[in-house]
Image (spheres, rainbow, N blue to C red):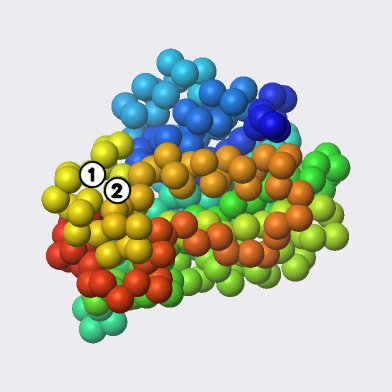
């Protein structure tokens, strides 16, 4: 049986202080990666440092801060093996009431920052001869939109196109680019409330756990993944082909 190990590898994770990003940060570190995590929550980020994880406070919705980080990373770190574009925020607005401010925020957070971080990562990988991995975290709403989620659906759909285009550009350098699309994953704690779990609209009859997304990303980021690129990996318990309605907590954006 082959084991996954990231010894000697540098892994950069955006939005790595909460939810799936936090679990990713700790999981990569447990597999001996050198982990650099980005986020806005200073307290949560400092807490990660007890795991020997490097935290950099960056507001990924502000391109100036992202560019400052890129400059720091290129000078101080200088190479990268895995980039996880995970930072995200839900946005519950329809086309009729989305403000320009909200639109710009979501575009900057979920498209501009992944573009800038991916550009940096791919250039460093090529310069150092590293056949690295770039993983973009989309969402099932890119295929199955909920009502009043216009900005969120737009940016998550954009990440899928970004993934394919990057894969075409970077394949000749041996760099693999993959989108991971979670379905209904409970990210407030490890276990969802039992009543919510039982009402999940997945074919498996429950919500997904954060660890189930983390395990997929660990494999895709590892040396075991040698031939997947430009693909979207949907991890949804069969939600896309289920005819069951979502629980109101999900359709209303509560979870």
Image side of residue 247 versus residue 173, left or right: left
Nearer the observer, 204 or 124: 204
| Residue 57 picture quarter | top left
Identified at 69% across, 31% down, the residue is: 1
Q: Residues within 10 Å of mark 1 (few under 14, many from 20)?
A: some
Marking on residue 186 = 2
| Residue 200 picture quarter | bottom left
Marking on residue 206 = none
Q: Residue furthest bottom?
A: 96
Q: Residue 31, position in %: x, y?
A: 59, 26
The residue identified by callout 1 is 192
Q: CA distance from mark 2 to mark 1?
A: 6 Å
Q: Residue 33, position in %: x, y?
A: 62, 27
* Up/down of 197 relative to 76, above or below: below
* Up/down of 41 relative to 242, above or below: above
Q: Are marks 2 and 1 in contact (CB under 8 Å)?
A: yes
| Residue 108 picture quarter | bottom left
Q: Secondary structure at mark 1?
A: loop
Q: Secondary structure at mark 2?
A: strand
Image side of residue 136 versus residue 1, left or right: left
Please say whether residue 48 is visible from this viewpoint: yes
Nearer the observer, 47 or 8: 8
Q: Residue 208, position in %: x, y?
A: 35, 50
Please say whether residue 76 is visible from this viewpoint: no
Mark 1 or mark 2, which is nearer the start of the sequence? 2
Nearer the observer, 74 or 227: 227
């Amino acid at each position: 049986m082959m084991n996954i190990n990231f010894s000697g590898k540098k892994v950069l994770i955006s939005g790595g202080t909460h939810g799936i990003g936090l679990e990713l940060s700790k999981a990569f570190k447990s597999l001996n990666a050198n982990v650099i995590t980005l986020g806005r929550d200073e307290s949560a980020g400092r807490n990660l440092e007890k795991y020997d994880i490097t935290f950099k406070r960056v507001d990924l919705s502000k391109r100036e801060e992202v560019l400052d980080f890129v400059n720091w990373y290129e000078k101080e770190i200088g190479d990268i093996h895995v980039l996880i574009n995970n930072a995200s925020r839900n946005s519950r607005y329809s086309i009729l009431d989305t403000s320009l401010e909200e639109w710009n925020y979501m575009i900057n957070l979920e498209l501009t920052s992944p573009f800038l971080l991916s550009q940096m990562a791919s250039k460093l990988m090529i310069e150092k001869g590293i056949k690295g991995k770039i993983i973009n975290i989309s969402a099932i709403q890119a295929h199955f939109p909920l009502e009043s989620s216009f900005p969120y659906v737009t940016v998550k759909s954009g990440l899928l196109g970004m993934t394919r285009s990057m894969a075409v550009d970077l394949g000749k350098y041996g760099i693999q680019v993959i989108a991971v699309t979670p379905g209904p994953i409970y990210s407030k704690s490890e276990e969802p409330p039992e009543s919510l779990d039982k009402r999940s609209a997945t074919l498996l009859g429950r919500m997904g756990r954060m660890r189930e997304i983390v395990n997929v990303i660990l494999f895709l980021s590892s040396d075991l993944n040698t031939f997947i690129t430009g693909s979207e990996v949907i991890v949804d318990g069969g939600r896309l082909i289920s005819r069951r309605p979502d629980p109101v907590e999900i359709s209303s954006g509560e979870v």
